[in-house]
Image (spheres, rainbow, N blue to C red):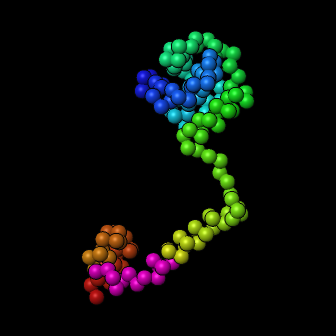
């Protein structure tokens, strides 16, 4: 409980302009996101013991959360603020158009693979190297053993 739901020094500054239910809900959203890597859809997902523990830290009555609207604009703003603080941002395509960056990267990786495949590895590998790369049993190892004995 202490490890997961205790506010750290840097997190207190995020609560400066928040009071009551807003302060408690923001903190619970923050801590829940850090634990689950997602936002709570409703207050029922957060353990009551965690709510009580966080409320005690904030010196807020845990009961103020009973009337809190978890789908309000305020909650959405809380989520945006948390994402900003944690370094998340909206994904944008930018000026290059959809998929262009991904396609360029893919083509680069394919060309690297083609260069690796084009290397005549037989001239670079010793017999011991080839034995280490092939399975020890089955038709491939039989073939490898036959090629090594010639």
Q: Is residue 129 above or below residue 28?
A: below
Residue 51 location (% of width, % of height): 55, 18
Depth check, front residue: 14 or 2: 14
**Residue 78 at x, y percent in the picture:** 64, 31
Point 73% across, 27% down: residue: 72
Residue 84 in view of the camera: yes
In the image, residue 68 lies at what x, y percent?
68, 19
Taking the spot 62% from the left edge, 46% from the top edge, the residue there is 89
- Above or below — where is 140 with respect to 54? below
Instruction: From the viewer's side, name the closer residue of 6 and 140.
Output: 6
Question: x, y percentage for residue 79?
Answer: 63, 34
Residue 52 visible, this orientation: no
Residue 139 occupies quadrant: bottom left
Q: Is the magenta stretch mostly helix, strand or loop?
A: helix
Which residues lie in the magenta part?
114-126
Tally the marks. 0
Frontmost residue, 132 versus 117: 117
Quarter placement of the N terminus: top left
Q: Does the magenta stretch include residue 15?
A: no
């Amino acid at each position: 409980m202490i490890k997961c739901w205790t506010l750290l020094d840097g997190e207190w500054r995020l609560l400066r302009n928040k009071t009551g239910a807003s302060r408690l809900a923001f903190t619970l959203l923050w801590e829940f996101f850090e634990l689950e890597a997602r936002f709570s859809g409703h207050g029922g997902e957060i353990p009551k013991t965690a709510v009580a523990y966080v409320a005690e830290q904030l010196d807020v009555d845990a009961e103020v959360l009973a009337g809190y609207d978890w789908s309000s604009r305020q909650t959405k703003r809380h989520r945006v603020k948390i994402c900003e603080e944690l370094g998340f941002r909206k994904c944008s395509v930018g000026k290059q158009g959809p998929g262009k960056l991904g396609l360029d990267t893919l083509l680069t990786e394919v060309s690297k693979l083609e260069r690796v495949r084009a290397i005549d590895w037989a001239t670079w590998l010793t017999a011991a190297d080839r034995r280490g790369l092939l399975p020890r049993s089955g038709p491939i190892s039989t073939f490898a053993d036959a090629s090594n004995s010639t």
